[in-house]
């Protein structure tokens, strides 16, 4: 896999890299483990260092993102004393049928140096679109959850979190 | 660090067939953060979990792609639809080729 430097990374190269990872994970989870470290561990692994606008453009390519505040329940603390562990959970009130379901949930922190925190790929077998995890936040920031439906619609919910002590080290 | 890769899964104890249940899972892992020198990130093979695969009855239910901006000792919650008794298996893959697995039996009461 090619490793373009973070500065000149193109959307195409990144999508190709992500696609290769996704495929190997789907077809042979066992085989994905011994992949050479160089293919996985470089700085462009999930998100390169970039402003949040670049992340949004790279992920969604300017597709319209609708306000999903009505259907997305984004649960975050108002004030996070420790930026290293910020609990977040996202629940989407949408049916999870094979025809119409939530395909992916992206969690993006606007001011993190790598804004994309995590991407959750879901299937109808989950019964309900609900995921949660703990985030690292570098400073007070907006956190957004972008939900991609199986028909390609994008919905977004956003919340601000005040972070007392940043959790990203340097 | 000796405990690295230990996986704990919590599934509710009373489940009825067809229920959508919430599962909590925790894995012990350092999730190494980016080191900086003179304000620039050091390019090296950081040690963190970048993929989580959830399977139930040997079928993939969900797959998470994670980055360093997920906390140390990552914790995840998600839901799944319990249709029949079987094994819920969660696999974590990290950037150093590590593979950690945890399983939970789904039983109906």
Image (cartoon, rainbow, N blue to C red):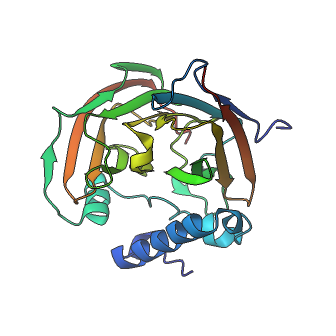
Residue occupying the point 20% across, 34% down: A71
Instruction: Give A25 or A96, whichever is nearer the viewer.
Output: A96
In percent of width and height, residue B89 lies at: 66, 44
In this image, A51 relative to A114: left or right?
left
Q: Is residue A13 left or right of residue B105?
A: left
Q: Residue B88 appears at what percent x and percent y?
A: 63, 40
Instruction: Please state which of residues A105 and B47 is positioned toward the viewer in this rendering.
Output: A105
Q: In this view, does A27 lie above or below B41?
A: below
Rendered location of residue A21, percent (x, y): 54, 68
Left or right: where B80 falls relative to B71: left
Quarter of the view holding residue B46: bottom right
Quarter of the picture holding the N terminus of chain B: top right
Rendering quarter of residue B50: bottom right
Q: Identify the residue at horizontal 54%, vertical 30% (top origin).
A: B23
Q: Nearer the viewer, residue B2 or A4?
A: B2
Q: Quadrant of residue A169?
A: top right
Q: How many labels does the image show?
A: 0
């Amino acid at each position: 896999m090619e490793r373009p430097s973070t500065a000149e990374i193109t959307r195409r190269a990144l999508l190709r890299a992500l696609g290769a990872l996704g495929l190997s994970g789907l077809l042979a989870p066992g085989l994905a483990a011994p992949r050479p470290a160089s293919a996985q561990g470089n700085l462009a692994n999930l998100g390169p260092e970039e402003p949040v606008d670049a992340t949004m453009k790279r992920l969604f390519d300017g597709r319209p993102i609708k306000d999903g505040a009505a259907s997305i329940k984004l649960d975050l603390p108002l004030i996070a004393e420790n930026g290293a562990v910020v609990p977040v959970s996202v629940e989407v009130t949408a049916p999870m049928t094979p025809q119409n379901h939530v395909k992916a949930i992206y969690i993006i922190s606007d001011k993190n140096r790598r804004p994309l925190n995590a991407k959750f790929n879901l299937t109808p077998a989950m019964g309900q679109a609900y995921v949660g995890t703990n985030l690292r936040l570098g400073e007070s920031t907006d956190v957004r959850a972008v939900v991609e439906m199986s028909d390609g619609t994008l919905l977004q919910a956003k919340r601000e979190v005040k972070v007392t002590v940043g959790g990203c080290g340097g | 660090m000796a405990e690295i890769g230990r996986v704990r899964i919590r599934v509710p104890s009373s489940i009825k067939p067809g229920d959508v249940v919430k599962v909590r899972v925790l894995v012990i892992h350092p999730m190494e953060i980016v080191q900086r020198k003179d304000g620039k990130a050091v390019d090296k093979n950081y040690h963190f979990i970048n993929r989580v695969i959830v399977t139930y009855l040997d079928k993939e239910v969900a797959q998470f792609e994670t980055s360093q901006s997920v906390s140390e000792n990552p914790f995840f919650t998600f839901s799944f639809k319990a249709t029949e008794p079987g094994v819920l298996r969660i696999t974590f893959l990290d950037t150093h080729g590590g593979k950690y697995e945890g399983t939970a039996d789904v039983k109906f009461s």
